[in-house]
Image (spheres, rainbow, N blue to C red):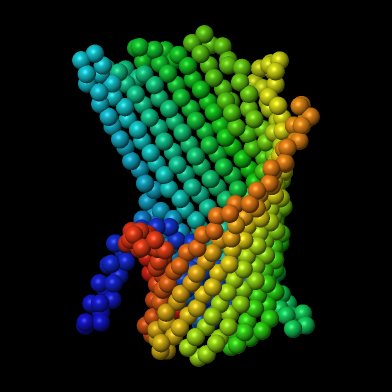
Amino acid sequence: MKKTFKIVALLLLVLVTSTFVFAQNSNTFTATAGTLRDDADNFMDVRYYNDVDFSNFFAWTNLSLDEANLGFAKKFDALYLGAYYNGDLWSSSTTEKSDNTDADIDTDSVEKTVSGYHSFDVLLGFSGMALKLDTYFDIDNNSEEMTEKGDLMSESKNNDSTYSFDLTWGGLSIPVGNVNLRPMATLGLDIEDSTEYSCNYDADGVKILETTNEADNSNTLTIKLASDIEWGSKESLFSVVGLSYAFKTAIGANGEIGKTTISDTSYVGFREDYKDVSNVFNSYYRFEYQASDNLKLGARVNADIEFTKNSDGYTYQDEAPEEKPEVDVESNTDIDSEIAFGMQYRFNPKFAMNLGLKSTLPSFTSTKTVSPASKTTTVESKWNDTFSSSLRTGFVWDINENCALDAYMSIPLNPSILMDILGGGLSLGFKYKM
């Protein structure tokens, strides 16, 4: 009875203090700075879903007050089905009202905001392969109306929406000599839609004096090829090298797409059209070392290189002005890297402690800008000498052979930041399989 009470009390504590967004990673992975994995990291991974050992089903969750974070997998003979959801169960909606009742002014304003995000993934495994569909929706709408003595004076509406769709293939395990290849391919589409609308009325709130429409939209297509290269044994020393290449092309536009005044004349505005092309190379090396029956060590090194070229153009609603904006072509090179260390110490068969340290190394950026109109070329290169580190810890409690509790907590390197622990650094996850 006392043990049950302690578990319930701990759950209540976590529900009160856990109010931040989770990624689809296990707390063991997070607590060891991405060096050690477990079933919660593998069950929705097209390369490693077959490594999850269960006969009937697998379930996983992280606790939070403001969102759902749920995963489930089941086997149907030769078919593997995995599903994962993260987001707001109920999109947030707020309404704010303000009144000004001075002697000469009687104005009211009402502002409404609706926002929410949802991520839903499905994985199908069959014949040693897998297909995974990732979807993500993030919507943020805001509207405001202002009235004076009951008459509508102005209104505005803003919409910021993001939609993402990724289709990933993987699952094959190809032995080549002493190494094992796990290839993966992804086709992705990201859509960003941002619009602003405003309208002003006359003193009677009837005749429209001016309307303005602005937009900032982009569509990004991504093709990614990747493979993990593994060797060694998980009972001693196990190593993985990950290599990937992604091609991205983005097309977008932003600017005033319409403006009308009281004289019903259109505003001579322009829309800035842009196109980005990126080549992204990612690489990492990770190893796990079973130093003893109780101690497991891990380390990881990441290096990312991105080459981006973007060019701008302009579309005019009416006649083009005599002096057109200068069109530039910009090329960027970015290099980022990080290093991480982790460990897990098992005190007994049911309880283990995790510890991790991750450091972000200085990054490099080079920008080349070509201006055909002025026939100039500028190059700017610099190192960002910012070096940052984060320390984290956690534990795993195997309650029984089917159920486990996986906890994570960030450790502020500045001891005065206590709220990092109490308000956003604590996570508690459960996994159950049978």
Question: What residue appears at the point 46 percent right and 50 percent down from the top-left corner?
Answer: 117
Image quadrant in which you'd find residue 48: bottom right
Q: Compared with residue 57, is residue 83 higher up or lower down, i.e. above or below?
A: above
> Is residue 356 depicted above or below 108 in this figure?
below
Residue positioned 58% across, 16% down in the render: 267
The foreground one among 165 and 289 is: 289
Q: Position of residue 18 (x, y in %)?
A: 35, 62
Q: Residue furthest top?
A: 263
**Vertical comparison of 109 with 167: above or below:** above
Q: Position of residue 131 (x, y in %)?
A: 63, 65
Q: Horizontal placement of 394 versus 248: left or right?
A: left
Q: Please identify the quadrant where the N terminus is shown.
A: bottom left
Quadrant where the C terminus sits is bottom left
Answer yes or no: is residue 172 visible.
no
From what the image shows, is residue 101 above or below residue 341?
above
Residue 394 relative to residue 333: left or right: left
Tell me if residue 243 can be seen.
Answer: yes
Place residue 79 in its image quadrant. Answer: bottom right
- Residue at the spot x=61%, y=40% of the render? 218
Q: Position of residue 17 (x, y in %)?
A: 31, 62
- Where residue 64 appears, as percent x and y from the top left, is 36, 61
Question: For the point 46% across and 24% down, which residue is it?
Answer: 198
User: How many numbered callouts?
Assistant: 0
Q: Of residues 429 and 191, which is closer to you in this image?
A: 429
Q: Is residue 78 left or right of residue 112?
A: right
